[in-house]
Every structure is written in C-alpha cells, then in structure tokens.
Image (cartoon, rainbow, N blue to C red):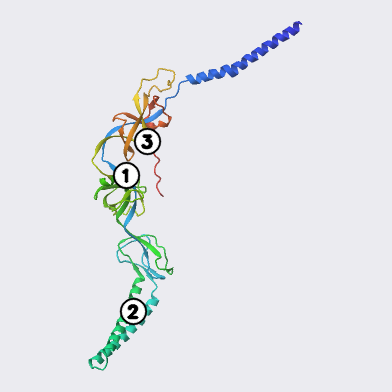
Amino acid sequence: MKRILIFIVVFVLLFGFAGAFGYFQFVTKPEMIKGFIANAPRPVPTVAAVTATAQRWTPGLSAIGSTHAFQGIDVSSQLAGIVTAIHIGSGQDVAKGAPLFDLDTSVEEADLKNNLATLKNAELAMERQHQLTLSANTTKANMDSAEAARDSAAAMVERSRRTIAQKTLVASFAGRLGIRKVDVGQYVSPGTSLITLQQLDPIFVDFPVPEQSLGLLKQGQPVNVAVDAYPGVTFTGAILLIDARVATESRSVLVRAQFSNADHRLLPGMFANVTVRAGEPRDIVAVPRTAVSFSLYGDSVFVATPAPPPSGGAQAATAPEKKPFKIERRFVHTGETHDLDVAILDGVKAGETVVSEGQIKLQNGALVTIDPKAVLQPPAIRQKE
C-alpha cells in the first residue's frame, strides 16, 4: 500500500507539473508576448519634406500636340516606268528644282521623233496650201485643214515633251529627304512613293485646346514645347493660327504654333508637351507634385509641425539627433502645374513644411523624422549608343 500511495503521489505531481507547463506555454506565454509587442516602442517613420514656397506664376494652358513639317510630301511619279538614275542619297538636303530620279523615257523619245516628223510634214503641207491660196488655186477650206493638221502635230510634239519631263522627278521645294525606297532598275507604278521630302525650318506644332479656354488665346502668343527626344530642353515659338471651327466630337479647337528649327532637331511626327502662357501673373503657393496625394475623395497633403521629443514608451525609438515632427493631414485645392510643382489654392500657407515623399506609411497625428537624404532621385536617362 505504501508503494501504491507513493506512486499515486508522484503521478499526481507529474501530471500537475505538465498541466502547469502546458498552461504557461499555450496560454500565459502568448499573452505575455502579445503584451510585449503592444507595448514595444515603435520606430518613427523617416520621410522627406519641403517648405511650401510663395511664387508668382503666369497662368498657362497645357496640351498634347504633334509636330508637322512646314511643307512635306511623298515624292512619287505620275507615270509608270523603270528607274534609270538616282541623283540623291537618303537624308540629304536638296535645293528647289534639284533632280531626284529619272525614269526610262526610251519609248517617249521615239514617239517624240515620230511626232516631230509628222509636224514637219504638216508644216510643209500648210506652206504649200498657203502658196496655192495666194495664187487662188485652192480653196480656203483646204488651207484651214492644213493649218489644223499642223496644230494637231505640234500638240502631239508638246505632249511627248511633257511626258518625258514628267519622268524626270525634281524637288518641289528646298528641304531634307527621307530614306530612299527604290533602286535603279526597279519598276514603279503611278503614285508609288519613292522618297519623302520635308521642309523642316520653320516647323509647326498642332495641339487642341478646350473650347472654354479659347478666349485666352491669340495670334503671336508665346508657346513652349518639350519633346521626349531632348529631356530638359524647351523650344519656344508663337501661335500662328487658330482653327475656324470647334470640333463637335471633342469640343476643342485646333491651334497651330510655329517654331524656328534651323538646327533641324525637331522632326515631323514628334510627340510634344505644349504649354501656353496666358493671362496676368498671380501669386500662389507651390509644392512638389509628389507631396500631393490625389484621390476620388479629394486631394490632400501632410503638413509637419515640430513636436516635443517622446519621453519613452511608444515612439521611443526616435534617434536623439533627429527632431520629431507631428503630421497633420489637410485636404487642399490644387491648381495648374509648372514642371515638377503644383499650385495649392487653399489648405497650405507659404513657409509650412510639407511631406514630399513617404506619405504611404503615414497616419494623421503620427510622429515622423525628416531626413533630407530620403529623397528619391529619378533614374538617369540612358543615352543612346
């Protein structure tokens, strides 16, 4: 009995110890960990910030346009034939009237010789009729028939010469040629494009403007254009023409601006970002576009104001050399944009500190630290080899 009692006592002790250990492991310990995590100091987010600045902007209209040559054609032949000579190269600058292509004219030249012989015979026949008319040995009708035959033969000669001339293609105006599309010995049919010819200086930029902005535009108004081919370069021109009608499908009017292009950097068909300065300059508050969070519920920014450093507990992980800021989310009304800045019409005053990067991790009323090195730099543009 004594051994049985000892066994029972030991079993009860072991069972109780296992139960207590299990309760600690699966109940008490998770609660302790949860409490440690809840009370652990949280790291203070680091953001980039800028100061809202007062600037004086001239109101502008932004649009997307395309470049067009002052004159531009596809050089093609009115007649069919085989290319017998090429006088130019691809990408060459040519003067007005410069020869470009020759087509085979052997058949037309043979016709010209035949027509010249016919003309000579008709002139001799008319001369004989003229002599007979003077001696009253022929009728006036015979003289008229001879004269008509002479005129018909002369017209056939002129037709042959014009046909031969049409098979010699020349530049209609001074400009730059594109890439040649035919080779010597190639047969071309009427209307086949042989090469393009573009007059590049000056050059046009056409862009649409909303109907409600039409009153702000006038001829001679300055226009700035940027193209993807030359980052950071702005081309300056002026409004040349405003279309005489408003497009019913888009309620916009087409505007054409003219630009000097002596260096031929602008080419027809380029995608152009157009800005037209219109109206009187006005004072605004500007912040970077990255500082504004755009949404369907309204545009907002985070304004940072100095806060006392945390004394412990939550937010205690703030580095002592970094001054903490408390952020406030404000809804704003935005205006036009200039380059990388956007105008704030209401909600932010000049001189206030605005978070420019890192807003996605922020909540209203949180503490942050500002690090100038936290600004993301845009990737360098890769140069073409």
Question: Any mark on residue 229, and which?
Answer: none
Residue 149 visible from this viewpoint? yes
Q: Nearer the viewer, residue 138 or 329?
A: 138
Residue denoted by label 1: 62
Helix, strand or loop for disc 1: strand
Q: Locate residue 178, reporting x and y percent.
A: 37, 60
Q: Is residue 145 left or right of residue 384?
A: left
Say whether marks 1 and 3 touch (CB < 8 Å). no
Can you give x and y, in whole percent of width and height, for residue 245 in the image?
A: 30, 52
Q: Quadrant of residue 306?
A: top left
Q: Label 3 neighbourhood size at 10 Å, few (<14), some (14-19), many (20+)?
A: some
Which residue is labeled 3 in the image?
290
Furthest toward the front, the residue is 248
| Residue extending farthest top | 2
What is the three-letter code of the residue carrying label 1?
Answer: Ser
Tag 3: amino acid: Thr
Disc nearer the start of the sequence (1/2): 1
Q: Nearer the viewer, residue 104 or 334?
A: 334
Contact, mark 3 vs mark 2 (Cβ under 8 Å): no
Q: Return the residue nearer the eye: 117 or 371.
A: 117
Q: Is residue 130 above or below residue 363?
A: below
**Residue 156, numbered label:** 2
Mark 2 Cα-neighbour bin, 10 Å: few <14, some 14–19, many ≥20 = some
Label 3 or label 2, whichever lies nearer to me, is: 2
Give residue 355's position: percent from left, percent from top: 36, 30
Type of amino acid under label 2: Met
Local SS, label 3: helix
**Callout 1–callout 2 Cβ contact below 8 Å:** no
Q: CA distance from mark 1 to mark 2?
A: 59 Å
Vertical placement of 355 versus 273: above or below?
above
